[in-house]
Amino acid sequence: MKILVVDDEAPIVQAITYNLRKEGYEPLAASNAEECMSLFKTQNPQLIILDVMLPSMSGFEICRRLRADSDVPIIMLTARSDETDRVVGLELGADDYVTKPFSMRELMARVRAILRRPPTAGNGAATSKLEVSGIVIDKIRHEVKVNGKEVELTPREFSLLEILATYPDQVFQRQALLDRAWGSDAYVEERTVDVHMRWLREKIEADPSRPRLLLTVRGIGYKLSSAPKA
């Protein structure tokens, strides 16, 4: 999952991107508003860590502009502990607010917590349906149809499929899937993901031995293809 870090202090950017990489995320870095908006448009990050004090344009203004077009989660960083700043950031649509200096462990925990939240539609309501490659997921009714035919999934299989369908073509590491589907506090081996993926393929693939939808990315994890090959 791509996470955009926007801060003009190079040591902070380096520290955050290093820790994000250790957590299995793909960090992107920007030092000003122009770089931020360019990367946001071209890379489609799943979360933005945004500093308030930036050259040429404040993080508040960037947040306001992002919120005009997107519900991407935003964590704001600031060196000021003034409650007014926090209120302004949250009112502009930020999802969380962290004051410098901060614990890197705490920041990573907040990142994980936000990315475990259900995605939202443009009006802020929870997205009720997902559709990828002939798979339709109804999250309210907890139903899945493949090419119009309903399939029965266990709650864990449903959760895994929902995660992958929310971000089609995005490669998820096994540990990331464990954290999101089982919870970061659960003690479950990564091999468990492989077993559940095999069961899931048997239910959604026409030929589970030659999967076209639920693909393994060697050495990394899994993804759900939005354009399966014939």
Image (cartoon, rainbow, N blue to C red):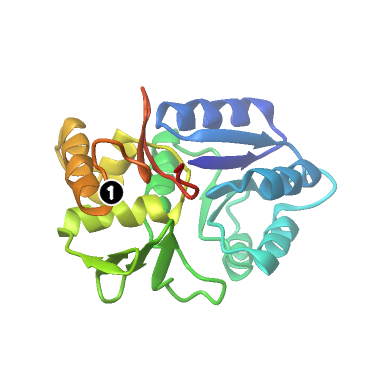
Rendered residue at 19%/47% (across/down): 202
Q: Position of residue 131 (x, y in %)?
A: 43, 64
Query: What residue does disc 1 label?
Result: 205
Q: Is residue 130 above or below residue 169?
A: below
The reply to whether residue 125 is visible in this rendering is yes
**Amino acid carrying mark 1 in the image:** Glu
Name the residue nearer the viewer: 70 or 147: 147
Name the residue nearer the viewer: 216 or 30: 216
Q: Position of residue 65 (x, y in %)?
A: 73, 62
Q: Position of residue 117 (x, y in %)?
A: 38, 59
* Residue 216 located left or right of residue 201: right
Q: Position of residue 10 (x, y in %)?
A: 68, 27
Specify the quadrant of the image occupied by residue 222.
top left
Q: Is residue 215 above or below residue 168?
A: above
Specify the quadrant of the image occupied by residue 36.
top right
The reply to whether residue 185 is visible in this rendering is no
Name the residue nearer the viewer: 78 or 186: 186
At mark 1, the secondary structure is: loop
Check disc 1: other Cα within 10 Å, few if <14, some if 14-19, many if 20+.
some
